Image (tube, helix red, strand yellow):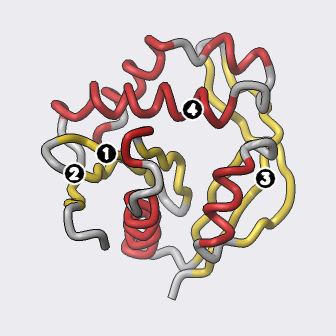
Amino acid sequence: MPNDVTLRPAVAEDARAVAEIWYHGWRDGHLGNVPDALLRVRTRESFWERAAARVGDTAVAWVNGEVAGFVMVVGDEVEQVYVSSAHRGSGVAGVLLAEAERLVGAGGHSLAWLAVAPGNARARRFYERSEWVDAGGFEYRASGPDGAISVPCQRYVKTLS
């Protein structure tokens, strides 16, 4: 772990920083890679609402007095992994992914999984370098205000030791 990274469960006061990182990071990895129906519901405001509602599923990486990134884990799924643009390339993402793997394992699961937009090459390279395996394409059911939206994704898996 890089020396200056502290991991901890998120608290309500982190929601704004998480939302900001999530919004910008999501747009970086998803614009042009997901259906228009999903883009229409992933408004800036939606990230603020979702971040506040998901504090209990979130762990944050704290660096030099600020939230540098976060992960959201539910059951055996690593739902979100995002690092602020200012901290990309610093090792924070690896620390967060390792924490997500730990949380999945602590929940009693021996296999972790996550979904990645096929066109998000940067994320896919990162997961592959982190020993995750592309298990093939599937339709992810993303939540929207009017029901689920089908999103073509790649499923990545990792067996936990």
Q: Are the two marked residues, 2 and 1, in contact with CB atoms closer than 8 angstroms?
A: yes
Residue type at tag 4: Trp
Q: Provide the residue designation for mark 2.
A: 63
| Residue 147 versus residue 151 in the image, above or below | above
Residue type at tag 1: Ala
Please, what secondary structure does the residue beneath circle 4 have?
A: helix
Which mark lies nearer to you, 2 or 3? 2
Q: Provide the residue designation for mark 4.
A: 26
Mark earlier in primary sequence (2, 3): 2
Residue type at tag 3: Gln
Mark earlier in primary sequence (3, 4): 4
Which mark lies nearer to you, 3 or 4? 4
Which mark lies nearer to you, 2 or 4? 2
Q: CA distance from mark 2 to mark 1?
A: 6 Å
Q: CA distance from mark 3 to mark 1?
A: 26 Å
Q: CA distance from mark 2 to mark 3?
A: 31 Å
| Residue 79 versus residue 13 in the image, above or below | below
Name the residue rendered at 80%, 42% in the picture. 119
Please, what secondary structure does the residue beneath circle 2 have?
A: strand
Residue 154, disc: 3
Q: Provide the residue designation for mark 1.
A: 68
Given residues 122 and 40, the one toward you in this image is 122
